[in-house]
Image (cartoon, coloured by chain):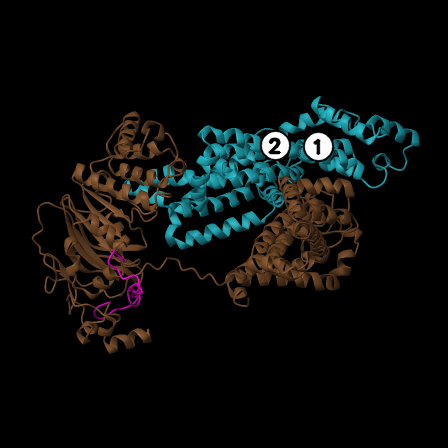
């Protein structure tokens, strides 16, 4: 709580609230006499050194009157707030005492009442209660009650659903006790916050009512009344109306800001950083990793060299190099946080500032930069993302969203683009495509949306499709259809595929080559047919963690030991050394590069101690185990 | 997105045809409007009966003769049984008869009709100005400050909008008068005479809502800019203008317009204060005088007109939103 009042917001709130409190407590004592002193020789004076804000029609000092009015203004505002909160509590907690039917009735009534603006309600009640300060307190209090009641209804409903209240009910605790012991204490904090903010708004409303001449009546005066009197003389003395107005704003802000500060203080726990920690490791600038055979095949669709992605000090991708031949399917596997998705986004030139991408991405023979290759990227690189539910603009028709690409890059007219969109939707087997194209995304199922996403990629002539966890969000039955469709696209259009997934079995089934990523680097690359010959200890553990038909179900499932280093961590040596059963001194000192040494035929591995020996728990080195325990 | 998933599951089961959603939405919304109208009409009717003591005596003052009081009471129908009065009240509404003013003896409906246009002009103009000013500013600031760019601009925008939104409209009105009328003599202080007299009242009424709307637009726009479908739009390699204006803004505007609709209701009420600052000859200056004079039939009439206006606006906003964002209709149904 103290912390909260040390923020700039908190300081401002405390200062303003302090000023208002001083005015309430001391102004009438100090300036009370001056505010009432009639001086008929000096009426309606302009501001001067004797009267800072001038005088009113009886020659009374307006500066003194403005300060003295603090007490009455604040008192009336608090009174009206009290009425609003009391009534709000009655309406809002009635359902707890009287049951479910009352809740529906109360909610319906409150919903109708809040539809009318507060000022309108206040005028309505002011008519009934009559003009004057007391009537205005009730009028504004009643006008504020529906808003309060709705807030309390919501809060109460939230608390009532919680386990301890349900348990108390089942235990036979009476309704009054449930309300007093369990419900009220749990809504107290948000209620105090809202009451404080509400008091600020009530103060402004009250000023409005008095300003209209319907609130405080002479000889009494609050700030609203002073403004009312000042407005008539605005040509002679604008300050007479403005000064009480400023006081109203200051006091209103004092309550509002205090409320906001309290609100901030009561949910301090959520210290959300500006950026979700992606993962990978060291801050060290990525020295060139894999030395690729520079003989880039002329048919390579994509060549990635030393790709890095950094967000400030965090470097989730630390130097990834690989290439993809025309029509080839390459899988990237790894745990979440290995940097797979960011690698895909970086290749597609979709990493946004403050993310920084380094390295080289050559696509169809040209090095990419977004500005220059927009059209090429738009028509030749197809992307499929993880969550098809959110990948389309909910406000626009499906067909339009596909057609848009045709209009932007294929110079098609509106009709032609739409016709091609329908054709493409047919190509990805959306039934009744012409009708479906006119529907909105929410009318498509998840699987259909994912197919539409693939259809979007087919608007052009894709040479490469990057699919990032394309089936993770889908039903198992739909997964296969979508993967089959991707295969088909690859066959029919000769497009290459980069399939990113955490699911090794999916990737192994669909791709000819696998890249295994760990902590922002590729640790092993191997043909899909040779998974059994994987040489990196991490790859072997990853494969062992996938249950298959031969898994002995009586034994505990294998798990990958340890956790990946955070993207901000500086790592010397191999990132996996800490957890690796085979790690030795060199592994901790020096980072291994990808090389064919020790790798499966046609593969490469970044490991000082590659091999296919079984990694039984017994083989875990003593030092490795110690480190694991220490971490 | 969870909501969408739910909808996916629920929609086909309950609504075999896509068009099936609309009748239900209209039915629901219509029922709510009718109930709200009934509450409004009944509250307005009960108002005069809830006044403590004798309302007619209070309106006419202590000096009025008992005969005058009795005659006025009979003219207002207050000597009839309550249910009869209620029936007459409702029947009067359908025939445009809102009773007769106690003070002027003129029909309330005619008195209000003349002033309704002035108030409507003010409210509609202020609403249009607020939306037209706020949405481009909020969206532009969002694009300029997304992902922590230009922090100074963000701070300046946040500070300015918070301060403007914290000042009540009638105070902004007084401030504007002090600056543009009293000090600079650019614009008239008060009254209704041509476009120049409209500028200050509209500005006073629009400033606060515009600040709130601009902030909401910025927040909405920022979150939309991070949405997956914007990434899809970027993957389509559309131009920045198309992405921001074609894809992001329409989705950000839905929430902004929802709020704008709610603000429009309170802007209609805000006209009461602003009209009194500028002596604008609308309903707002009428109701204040009527309340002070205890002219209950007149107050009743103004309350009905304002309340009706707010209810119709809310309904209209809901319908517009249903068209703009088809999901909201499903969500409600």
Label 1 residue SS: helix
Residue situated furthest right in the rendering: B66
Q: Are marks 2 and 1 in contact (CB under 8 Å)?
A: no
Question: In this rendering, is residue B308 above or below A329?
Answer: above
State the residue in front, A541 or B250.
A541
Count neighbours of disc 2 (C-alpha within 10 A) and say few if under 14, some if 14 to 19, many if 20 or more: few
Q: Colour of chain A?
A: brown
Please provide percent x and percent y for residue B284. Answer: 67, 35
Please provide percent x and percent y for residue B259. Answer: 53, 41
Q: Chain of mark 2?
A: B
State the residue in front, A480 or A278.
A480
Indicate which disc residue B41 carries: 1
Please provide percent x and percent y for residue A357. Answer: 25, 54
Label 2 residue SS: helix
A550 in the magenta segment: yes
Q: Chain of mark 1?
A: B
Residue matched to label 2: B31
State the residue in front, A196 or A602.
A602
In-image side of B228 versus A366 (left or right): right
In-image side of A202 versus A437 (left or right): right
Question: In this rendering, is residue A283 above or below A485?
Answer: below
Residue situated furthest top in the rendering: B95
Using the numbered discs, state the Cα–Cα distance from disc 2 to disc 1 in whole angstroms.
Answer: 15 Å
Q: Which residues are magenta?
A: A547-575
Question: In this rendering, is residue B168 above or below A74?
Answer: above
Task: State which quarter of the image contains the C terminus of chain A.
Answer: bottom left
The quarter of the picture where residue A464 lies is: top left
Residue B281 visible in the current orientation: no
A553 in the magenta segment: yes
Please provide percent x and percent y for residue A122. Answer: 70, 43
**In front: mark 2 or mark 1?**
2
Which chain shows up in cyan? B
């Amino acid at each position: 709580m103290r912390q909260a009042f040390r923020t700039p917001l908190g300081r401002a709130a405390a200062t303003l609230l302090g000023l208002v409190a001083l005015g309430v407590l001391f102004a009438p004592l100090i300036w009370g006499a001056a505010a009432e002193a009639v001086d008929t020789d000096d009426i309606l004076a302009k501001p001067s050194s004797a009267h800072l804000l001038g005088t009113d029609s009886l020659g009374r000092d307006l500066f003194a009157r403005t300060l003295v009015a603090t007490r009455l203004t604040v008192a009336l505002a608090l009174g009206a707030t009290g009425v609003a909160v009391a009534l709000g509590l009655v309406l809002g907690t009635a359902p707890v005492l009287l049951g479910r039917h009352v809740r529906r009735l109360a909610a319906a009534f409150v919903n109708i009442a809040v539809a009318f603006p507060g000022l309108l309600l206040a005028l309505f009640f002011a008519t009934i209660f009559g003009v004057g300060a007391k009537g205005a307190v009730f009028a504004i209090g009643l006008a504020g009650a529906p808003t309060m009641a709705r807030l309390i209804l919501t809060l109460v409903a939230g608390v009532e659903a919680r386990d301890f209240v349900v348990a108390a009910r089942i235990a036979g605790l009476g309704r009054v006790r449930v309300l007093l012991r369990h419900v009220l204490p749990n809504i107290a904090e948000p209620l105090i916050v809202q009451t404080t903010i509400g008091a600020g708004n009530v103060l402004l409303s009250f000023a409005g009512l008095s300003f209209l001449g319907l609130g405080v009546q002479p000889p009494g005066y609050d700030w609203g009344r002073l403004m009312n009197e000042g407005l008539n003389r605005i040509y002679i003395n604008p300050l007479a109306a403005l000064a009480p107005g400023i006081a109203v704003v200051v006091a209103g802000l004092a309550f509002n800001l205090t409320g906001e500060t309290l609100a901030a203080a009561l949910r301090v726990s959520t210290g959300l950083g500006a950026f979700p920690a992606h993962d990978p490791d060291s801050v060290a600038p990525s020295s060139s990793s894999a030395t690729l055979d520079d003989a880039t095949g002329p048919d390579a669709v994509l060549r990635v060299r030393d790709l890095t992605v950094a967000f400030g000090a965090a470097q989730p991708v630390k130097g990834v190099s690989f290439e993809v031949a025309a029509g080839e399917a390459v899988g990237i596997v790894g745990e979440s946080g290995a940097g797979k998705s960011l690698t895909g986004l970086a290749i597609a030139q979709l990493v946004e500032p403050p993310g920084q991408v380094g390295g080289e991405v050559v696509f169809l023979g040209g090095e990419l930069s977004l500005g220059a290759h927009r059209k090429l990227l738009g028509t030749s690189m197809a992307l499929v993302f993880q969550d098809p539910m959110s990948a389309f603009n909910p406000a626009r028709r499906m067909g339009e969203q596909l057609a848009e690409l045709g209009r932007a890059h294929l110079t098609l007219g509106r009709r032609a683009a739409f016709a091609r969109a329908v054709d493409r939707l047919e190509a990805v087997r959306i039934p009744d495509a012409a009708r479906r194209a006119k529907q909105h995304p929410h009318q498509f199922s998840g699987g259909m949306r994912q197919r539409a996403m693939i259809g979007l990629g087919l608007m052009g002539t894709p040479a490469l499709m990057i699919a990032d966890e394309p089936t993770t969000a889908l039903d198992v039955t739909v997964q296969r259809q979508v993967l089959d469709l991707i295969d088909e696209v690859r066959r029919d259009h000769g497009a290459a595929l980069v399939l990113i997934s955490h699911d090794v079995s999916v990737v192994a089934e669909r791709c000819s080559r696998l890249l295994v990523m760990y902590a922002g680097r590729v640790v092993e690359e191997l043909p899909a047919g040779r998974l059994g010959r994987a040489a990196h200890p991490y790859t072997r553990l990853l494969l062992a963690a996938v249950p298959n038909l031969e898994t002995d179900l009586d034994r505990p499932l294998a798990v990958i030991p340890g956790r990946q280093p955070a993207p901000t961590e500086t790592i010397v040596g191999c990132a996996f050394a800490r957890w690796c059963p085979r790690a030795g001194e060199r592994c901790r000192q020096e980072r291994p590069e990808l090389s064919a040494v020790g790798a499966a035929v046609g593969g490469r591995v970044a490991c000082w101690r590659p091999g296919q020996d079984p990694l039984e728990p017994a083989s875990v080195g003593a030092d490795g185990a110690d480190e694991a325990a220490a971490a | 997105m969870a909501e969408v998933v739910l909808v996916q599951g629920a929609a086909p089961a309950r609504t075999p045809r896509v068009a099936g959603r609309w009748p239900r939405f209209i039915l629901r919304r219509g029922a709510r409007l009718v109930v709200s109208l009934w509450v409004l009409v009944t509250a307005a009717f009960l108002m005069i009966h809830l006044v403590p003591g004798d309302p007619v005596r209070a309106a006419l003052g202590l000096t009025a003769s008992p005969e005058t009081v009795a005659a006025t009471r009979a003219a207002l129908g207050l000597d009839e049984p309550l249910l009869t009065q209620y029936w007459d009240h409702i029947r009067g509404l359908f025939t445009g008869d809102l009773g007769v003013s106690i003070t002027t003896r003129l029909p309330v409906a005619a008195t209000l009709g003349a002033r309704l246009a002035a108030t409507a002009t003010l409210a509609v103009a202020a609403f249009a100005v607020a939306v037209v000013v706020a949405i481009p500013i909020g969206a532009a600031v969002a694009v300029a400050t997304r992902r922590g760019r230009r922090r100074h601009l963000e701070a300046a925008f946040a500070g300015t909008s918070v301060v403007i939104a914290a000042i009540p409209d009638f105070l902004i009105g007084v401030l504007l008068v002090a600056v543009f009328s009293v000090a600079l003599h650019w614009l008239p202080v008060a009254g209704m005479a041509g476009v120049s007299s409209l500028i200050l009242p509209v500005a006073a009424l629009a400033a606060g809502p515009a600040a709130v709307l601009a902030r909401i637009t910025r927040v909405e726009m920022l979150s939309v800019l991070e949405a997956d479908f914007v990434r899809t739009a970027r993957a389509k390699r559309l131009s920045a203008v198309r992405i921001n204006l074609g894809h992001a803004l329409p989705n950000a505007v839905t929430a902004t317009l929802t709020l704008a609709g709610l603000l429009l209701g309170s802007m209609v009420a805000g006209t009461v204060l602003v009209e009194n600052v500028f002596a604008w000859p609308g309903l707002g200056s009428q109701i204040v005088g009527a309340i002070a004079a205890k002219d209950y039939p007149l107050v009743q009439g103004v309350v009905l007109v304002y309340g009706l206006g707010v209810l119709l606006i809310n309904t209209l906003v809901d319908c517009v939103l249903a068209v703009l964002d088809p999901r909201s209709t499903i969500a409600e149904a």
